[in-house]
Image (tube, rainbow, N blue to C red):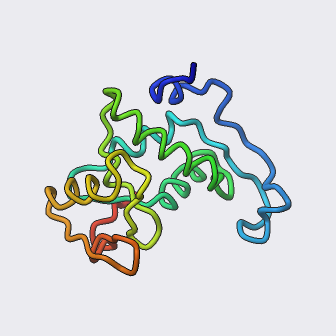
Amino acid sequence: MSRSWKEKLNKKDLPKIVEIPEKMRKRLGEGKMVVPSPLEVYEIMKDVPEGKLITINMIREKLARRHGVNTACPITTGIFVWIVANASTEGVYTPYWRTLKEGGVINEKYPGGVEEVRKLLEKEGFEVTRRGRRYVVKDFEKYLVGD
């Protein structure tokens, strides 16, 4: 039997600090990287207030600063954003719809897909437009959370 989303939030062996793997150095540079815990990602996502937005890369930057390293793992951070969003379907409240991909793109893998996320964003006053096959929050940069 697979674990619930809520259970996946409580991964015990993380966070950990590692050298940036060689195959990721071209994109991320040299130095140290944090592999965050799902709960750290949850803590950041749950605190994004109504009327504000955050991107996954901004979450990575916050995690890197918190741990005093060069970057946070883009793969695990993205997976943990998805876990946090899905845990909200099991009673772990998180305004996951306020967490966007780069460029203000709505994450189509969130619960309910693009349509549900779009409704939640529009309910908060954001304008969602289509750019090719993707949906983006118009002028999302104006609404990004500060530090």
Report whether 25 appears left or right of 48: right
Q: Nearer the viewer, residue 124 or 109?
A: 109
Q: Can you say which quadrant of the picture contains the C terminus?
A: bottom left
Quarter holding residue 37: top right
The x, y position of residue 54, in whole percent, is: 38, 59
Closer to the camera in the image, 14 or 3: 3
Residue 8, relative to residue 58: is it above or below?
Answer: above
Residue at (53, 36) in percent of width and height: 38
Left or right, 29 with reference to 5:
right
Of 130 and 6, which appears nearest the observer? 130
Count the labels in the image.
0
Q: Is residue 37 left or right of residue 99?
A: right
Residue sitting farthest toward the right:
22
Counting from the top left corner in percent of width and height, residue 129 is at 26, 75
* x, y percent for residue 83: 48, 39
Q: Position of residue 19 (x, y in %)?
A: 81, 51
Quarter assignment of residue 99: bottom left
Q: Residue at x 43, y 61 (%)?
A: 55
Q: For the point 32% across and 39% down, which residue is it?
A: 94
In the picture as drawn, the residue positioned furthest to the top comes out as: 1
Of residues 139 and 121, the one drawn nearer to the viewer in this rendering: 121
Q: Where is the N terminus found, in terms of image quarters?
A: top right
Residue at position x 14%, y 63% from top? 125
Res 140 quadrant in image = bottom left
